Image (cartoon, rainbow, N blue to C red):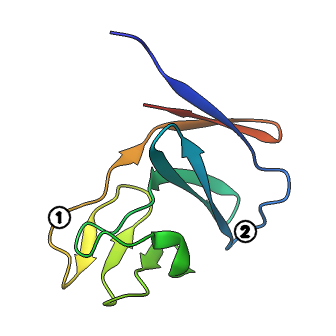
Amino acid sequence: MVDESLVVDIAGLSPGEMKAVQHGRLSVLICNVEGEFYALENECSHAAVPLDEGTLRGCEIECDFHGALFDVRSGEALAMPATSPVRSFPAKRRGNFLTVYF
């Protein structure tokens, strides 16, 4: 098995902000929650729409399409209509860079 990772420049990502980055065909959402960074798949498990079009409030992101709610720390689905989690990925900050592991 090959270990894969993605290094993301997070220098301009302020608390409460998020951004989508590509890793091959996978879109990954990076979220800054009060200086802690989290990485998850950038696709709602209910409607398959990008989560970066939604709203980040604390540790929760709301899908803009139907209002599904997810915990960015774990990917857990918190509110209907989503019942399945989104994938979350371990990440480690090193200065202005975040390494996301797949």
| Residue beneath the point at 24% across and 61% down | 85
Query: Residue 12 is drawn in which quadrant?
Result: bottom right
Q: Earlier in the sequence, mark 1 or mark 2?
A: 2
Q: Which residue is mark 1?
A: 84
**Figure quadrant of residue 58:** bottom right
Q: Which mark is residue 7?
A: none
Mark 1 vs mark 2: in front:
1
Q: Is residue 8 left or right of residue 49?
A: right
The percent position of residue 80, horizontal first and vertical second, equals 19, 85
User: In the drawing, does residue 47 fall left or right of residue 26?
Assistant: left
Q: Which residue is located at x 43 percent, y 42 percent? A: 89
Name the element at disc 2.
loop
* Residue displayed at 26% across by 75% down: 47
* Residue 33 rendering spot, x and y as whole percentages: 62, 65
Is residue 89 left or right of 93 when viewed as pictured? Answer: left
| Quarter of the image with the N terminus in it | top left
Q: State whether residue 48 appears in this view.
A: yes
Residue at disc 1, secondary structure: loop
User: Residue 101: where, in percent of width, then height?
Assistant: 49, 30
Whether residue 33 is visible, yes or no, is no
Q: Position of residue 27 (x, y in %)?
A: 49, 52
- Amino acid type for the residue under numbered disc 2: Pro
- For the residue marked with disc 1, what is the amino acid? Ser
- The vertical placement of 59 against 42, above or below, is below
Q: Please rate how many residues cluster around mark 1, counting C-alpha atoms within 10 Å: few if below 14, some from 14 to 19, many from 20.
A: some
Q: Is residue 85 above or below residue 59?
A: above
Which of 45 and 75 lies nearest the eye of the viewer? 45
Q: Which residue is mark 2?
A: 15
